[in-house]
Image (cartoon, rainbow, N blue to C red):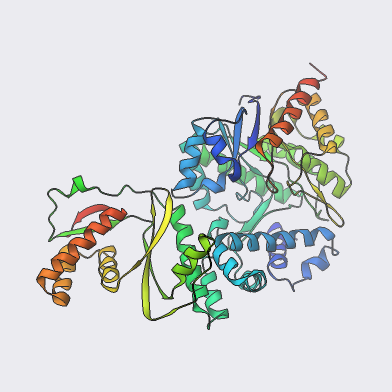
Amino acid sequence: MKRFHGFGLGMRPPHYSAFIAGAVPVDFVEVISENFMVDGGRPLHTLAAVRAQYPVALHGVSMSLGSADRLRAEYLARLKALADRIDPLWVSDHLSWTGNAHFNAHDLLPLPYTTEALDVVCANIQHVQEVLGRALLIENPSSYLTFAESEMTEWEFIAEMCVRTGCYLLLDVNNIYVSACNHGFDPCDYLAGVPMDRVRQIHLAGHSQGAHLLIDTHDEPVPDSVWALYGQVCQQLGMVATMIERDDNIPSLDALLDELSIARRLAAHCLPIAA
Amino acid sequence: MSLSALQRAMGDFLVDATANDFATQMHNAPGLHVYRNNYRSTLLACIRDTYEKCWAWMGDDAFDMAAHTHIDAKPPTSWTLDAYGHDFPDTLRALYPEDPEIADMAWLEWAMRRAFDGADATPVDVAQLDGVNWEQVCFTMIPTLKLGDVTTNAAALWSALDAEETPPRVETFPAPVTLCVWRQDLSPCFRTLKTTDAQILRMAHGGASFGSICDLLARQNGVTEAANLAGAALGQWLSDGFIAKFNSSF
């Protein structure tokens, strides 16, 4: 899988018309898969028009790779149909669970980092990769809980997951920062522990301070703390597809493009140490 | 604890605001409540988005109370959030039996939401009428076409709210009236049907032949008037893009 696809934005409804017109100077667009896993109508019409203008990455939020129950066949069938329809750059989802056979929280819920969970996640990733006929990108989560049952760190879990499944990584720099603050680990340990050679995309986003924890709200500009960590990531990685992920309190496209310009400058400036 | 047991316990904690076994087990970690808040706020936002005209009609307090009642009683089960709240009209009907326009408007909003991203179909056009055996033909209607009965002027209320105009007074009809909802091109739309139009559209939607529809109209109205009514209905269905395919009834 090609390593660098440029700089992109997550496509959100207020900006659909600009993307359809091809008027946004980005190298790729990321869309939320589930928004387009529908039978027909305007969503698919919109996506086809955007796809005619830009390479598109599919980013899911409901695959529930960490679910102890079987993955939902209808979900996978719809995702495969969508991927076949638009020929995405890649398909990604999260290291999390969202529900089981009878319940769906519609949230990215945390996993205990146990050998049992690793077996479940790896089996599910392998199943999805077989159904889709392509390797997945898995995004590291932000989380607000840790479990006494955990037997390894998140980065150890991710490293083993990549070895077993051959999946790639979507490294969310904000999520590393949020979880590091919430759980008291050093982001440098995280960056040293995940297999950087598997990273094919980076997310940049903002967060908010809650009563006790940092909350991964995606409703603020990327803060200095996350930019600094992104600089470290670029030093280790070199050029990797990078995008701004904004989900709430959506600003103008110009504001998002200004943030993307910062990412371009940082990535160009922070050349890999080994290069 | 196995992964499966942990996920069941956390799911129970999220769904039932009074269930705290999992919280005790997790030493009341503050993060638990972030997930519980996320769960409820996501579902509330979903219901508000789907039923935005009901929300506007009812006001924040009454609507949110109804939404929270629904969230407590109906945890989501589908993989897609789009499916959540399909039975919210039933919750509203139970909570507000004296205000039937609320549940009627909710039914309309749900039907329009489903028409928005329902399956595509190309309606037949006039050029395809040549050679049709009108006695035997029956119809496959477009998949987004839905019919439903209301007992109030909820459609007029919806239209006024959509246009940001002052809604009319609520009217309760002496007998149920049928609304049809469908998608024309990319936009959901709806229309109120007269009694006979509703009856024959239901027949056609259910697979009855055009000949049997004409027979019914002839029994009710006489042969001459039946021909006028059937022709007008067929013209309207074609104009609205209801018919996806002509089928032989044999």
For this orientation, the residue located farthest to the front is B166
For this orientation, the residue located farthest to the left is B223
- Residue A1 as seen in the image, left or right of residue B3: left
Position of residue A274 measured from the top left corner of the image (x, y, whole percent): 81, 18
Residue at (51, 33) in percent of width and height: A51
Residue at (69, 42) in percent of width and height: A251
Number of callouts in the render?
Answer: 0
- Which image quadrant for residue B28? bottom right
Residue at (88, 43) in percent of width and height: A185
- Residue B102 as seen in the image, left or right of residue B246: right
Reply above or below: B241 against B174. Answer: above
Position of residue B107 measured from the top left corner of the image (x, y, whole percent): 47, 68
- Residue A37 as seen in the image, left or right of residue B125: right
- Which image quadrant for residue B68? bottom right
Position of residue A46 measured from the top left corner of the image (x, y, whole percent): 49, 41
Does residue B89 appear in the picture of this structure?
Answer: yes
Which quadrant: the N terminus of chain A? Answer: top right
Does residue A84 appear in the picture of this structure?
Answer: no
| Near-viewer residue (A181 or A163) | A181
Position of residue B149 measured from the top left corner of the image (x, y, whole percent): 39, 73
Reply above or below: B95 against A194. Answer: below
For this orientation, the residue located farthest to the top is A275
| Near-viewer residue (A247 or A126) | A247
Which quadrant: the C terminus of chain A? Answer: top right
| Near-viewer residue (A78 or B169) | B169
